[in-house]
Image: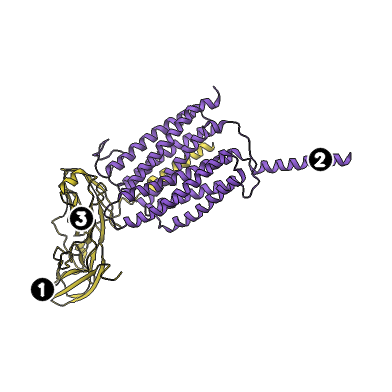
Amino acid sequence: MKTKFFYLALAAVLAIAITGCGKKEDTNEQPVANSNAKKVIDTSTVGSVTGSVTLDGKPVPAKPINMSAEPYCQKAHPNPVVPPEVVVDDKGDLANVVVYVKDGLADYNFDTPKEPVVLNQQGCMYDPHIIALMTGQTFEVKNDDQTTHNIHPMPKDNREWNKSQPPGATPIDETFGRAEVAIPVKCNVHPWMKSYIFVFKNPYYAVTSKDGKFTLKDLPPGTYTIEAWHEKYGVSDQTVTIGAKESKPLTFTFKTAAASGD
Amino acid sequence: MPETEKLQGVHRFAVATAAVTVLLLMAGALVTSNDAADSVPDWPLAYGRIIPPLVGGIRYEFAHRVFAATVSILTLVLAVWLARSGTRIARKLGWTALALIIAQALLGALRVLRGHPAVTATMHATLAQIFFVTVVSLALLTSAWWQRDLSSLDDRGSPRLRPLAVVTTAAIFVQLILGAGFRHGAFGILPHLVGFVVVTFLIVWTCRAVRKRFGQVRDLRRWGVLLQAFLGTQILLGVAAYWAVVQAMHATQPSMAYVVITVAHVLVGALTLASSVVLTLSCYRLIRPKAVVALRSAMETTRTGGTRAESSRA
């Protein structure tokens, strides 16, 4: 009798584990209904914020990636590849910094862009390294490699998914329904493949290119908190007030540990 | 056929199953250390096939699944074999092992299909330890030594070794859960460090009690020595693993040193628990329960008292 109860209890625990412990499959994640927003931007008054992001100090040289676990990836790179985490030129211009309006924006109506944002897997590396898009915008993942990848974003507020993409497979199209910053993306087949996705409710964001420059255009007049995010150097905030048709310059400077005396 | 001879085959099979389980634990630890747990997004198939493309992290995840399937088959055979020839307790334990490995497979599927590594992976790692010690216990219970007529020992020390060994085993088990929780992001390092202090104290205490009270009993002494040896190794590996984890925090990919040290730390943790379980079971096999000792003492006192009364009457 006792044995029967034991196995029944074990089965019950299992059933609870399977049905109850999983992540929420349906997070009720729906694209933001932008059309319900109340305000419409007066395009005759919009201004912009233009600037650059620099790095003060010499970054610690990154170790080259060891791709020996996958001969295809190793062959794709005859020369050693370093992770694209700190991309900085001789002048200190810092790439892959996400600059965006963190605060101060009223509840405007924004259209979701029709064109997808593409993340390509090429030579067992993500291109681009940082992705920014709007809620509801199509996020397209392509695999140009002749090897298998899995794409695994690990958001906190959006739905987590993990999909495999063998060579020649059709692109994967997904959307993110909720605004969320710095969603880590991984390929668990090739653990050096890492990226970040930024999802915004508005179009006021930019990712710095190699020259460290950015532009947030068509901003309605107002006072905004602008945040710059870098995966190694953290975040930096600045407040800026834009008048009608005004263009404001803005410079962000991150410091290496050596430069900041840490 | 005598009981001992009947169990010889199943004992060997249980030992083999335990050995393959060690390999399974190693394969599982390799998956985590190589950050390859999500490299195969589907289950029970892998990339829709029985054998997926064996590249990168998929190799670790697939090897883990192959070992898991092997151990499941071995456990099924073991449970059936024990049902036909084992003792009552061994039969029950055999079916328990089978239920555990099925539960473990389902938890593994849950980990793959539903994510949440902090919860599912910690549960998966915990159940792995329970399954391992169940198979190790089966190997001990079916051994010729366990079946033999053994002289019982009296434990007159305090606290009694039997409950002390149980507490030590329980503490090691909790420590392994805390370690798995830290590894999979459920807890920070602090609970595991506190657990380390508690477990070290309890193991040293238990082994000291074994040495002082039963130093001449080889069957207890050897397990105590083994437990202490694993503890020493595990402390060194723990320090190294902490260093490796700190180094890996900002690394682009897991280094060889990180993988080797953390996998060894997981394995020696499991072996520490297993040796503590064996010591505990051996204590229960060899040392008389407290009540029996008390009864014997009472009988001896009565006999002595009676003899004294008779002599005074004479």
User: Do the residues under discs 3 and 1 have CB atoms within 8 angstroms?
Assistant: no
**3 or 1: tag closer to the N-terminus:** 1
**In which image quadrant can residue B60 be found?**
top left
Please, which chain is the residue tagged with disc 2 on? Answer: B
Discs 3 and 1 lie in a common subunit: yes
- Name the residue beneath numbered marker 1: A44
Marks 1 and 2 sit apart, C-alpha to C-alpha, by: 114 Å
- Using the image as rendered, state which of residue A89 and residue B98 is in the foreground: A89
- Using the image as rendered, state which of residue A38 and residue A93 is in the foreground: A93
- Judging by colour alone, the chain drawn in purple in this rendered image is B
Image point (51%, 39%), residue name: A5
- Name the residue beneath numbered marker 2: B306
Mark 1 or mark 2: which is in front?
A: 2
Quadrant where the image shows the C terminus of chain B:
top right
Above or below, A55 against B211 in this view is below
Mark 2 or mark 3: which is in front?
A: 3
- Using the image as rendered, state which of residue B221 and residue A214 is in the foreground: B221
Q: Is residue A23 left or right of residue B202?
A: left
**Residue A226's mark?**
none
Mark 3 or mark 1: which is in front?
A: 3
Please, which chain is the residue tagged with disc 3 on? Answer: A
- Name the residue beneath numbered marker 3: A82
- Judging by colour alone, the chain drawn in yellow in this rendered image is A
